[in-house]
Amino acid sequence: MANKPQPVATDISRPYWDALKARRIELQQCDACGRWNFFPRRHCPHCLSDRLAWREVSGRGKLLTYTIARIPTLPDFADEAPQKLAVVELAEGVHLNTTLVGLDEDEIQIGMAVRPVFDASGDTPLLRFTGENKALTVIKRAADDTPEVASPAKAKRQIHFKDFESLKALVSDDYSGWSNTYTVGQELIDQFAALSGDDYWIHTDPERARKQGPFGGTIAHGMLIQVLLSRLTMPLDWELTGFGNMANYGSNKLRFPSPVPAGSRIHGRARVKAVDEVKAGTQLTLEMCVHVVGQERPALINELIVLYML
């Protein structure tokens, strides 16, 4: 969300923040006793020497302790709920307060090996951590309501809707890349509440939701997120040809695993889950997932059935 508090660099700490901007981690090491220090300071807390030098470290370490904050620490952090607050011990022995990202709750274990993630989504880069075996390394800033990719699009594979051998080859456990992003603001939530008649306070009363709600503020209706699928363009590298009509036939599964706080940016990805030959034509099952940007857990899972006919 746009109003999150940001750390302020001081003369002493500025080398640390400048290093994060360059996607490096630098800590102070005492040239007198050799000990590493964090947080930044003028004198070594171990021997009181002022001979402190900034040196780059890998950022690898282990999880010392953590807690799950299901009520946001501030309303501004509602889009990160539940917050995985942690203390990490680096290989150099220093302890860092941080947030875990890219991990489901059942993956988090005290003592697990972790590595750094550079969070560049805000005005000031932040140091987060994830599991050693995770691919996440950088969280990039995403512009609100990003348009479809402006670079020249690659030609899509064209597959006839009756070419079942080629269609079944699309079935995969792997998801597409991410779609464009879209901002789910309070005004949009209010408009959907007026249209649908679902004006429950958790969606429409920000003040009450901040005081009484479990998410630190208002959240979008699950069905609004479902509707907004049409605003997200999934970067699929194929398209069906040869059909005369197509219809959304329904959904095998529709779930809302996590909330979308007002003001969040969402994006989506998809995969082909099944292809079936039916009497009317070809039935394609697309598993479409919508996430709050930066969140591993989806806000929406829809197994959408699309019917292609002559």
Image (cartoon, rainbow, N blue to C red):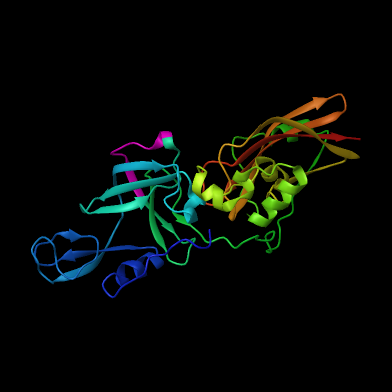
Residue 196 placement (x, y as % from top left): 75, 43
Foreground pick, 175 / 232: 232
Position of residue 9 measured from the top left corner of the image (x, y, whole percent): 34, 71
Q: Residue at x 40, y 45 (%)?
A: 84
Side (left or right) of 253 relative to 96: right
Residue situated in front as seen by the camera: 96 or 149: 96
Per the rendered image, the range of residues in magenta is: 106-115
Q: Residue at x 49, y 60 (%)?
A: 121
Residue 124 in the image: state x and y as whole percent: 43, 66
Nearer to us in this view, 30 or 172? 30
The furthest residue to the top: 279
Position of 269 relative to 17 (above/below): above
Q: Is residue 114 above or below residue 161?
A: below
Residue 247 belongs to the span the image colors magenta: no
Decide if residue 187 is on the left or right side of residue 244.
left
In the rendered structure, does residue 110 fall within the stretch colored magenta?
yes
Image quadrant assignment for residue 18: bottom left
**Residue 32 in the image: above or below residue 227:** below
The residue sitting at 30% across, 37% down in the picture is: 110
Query: Which quadrant would the C terminus be assigned to in this image?
Result: top right
Any part of residue 169 in sight: yes
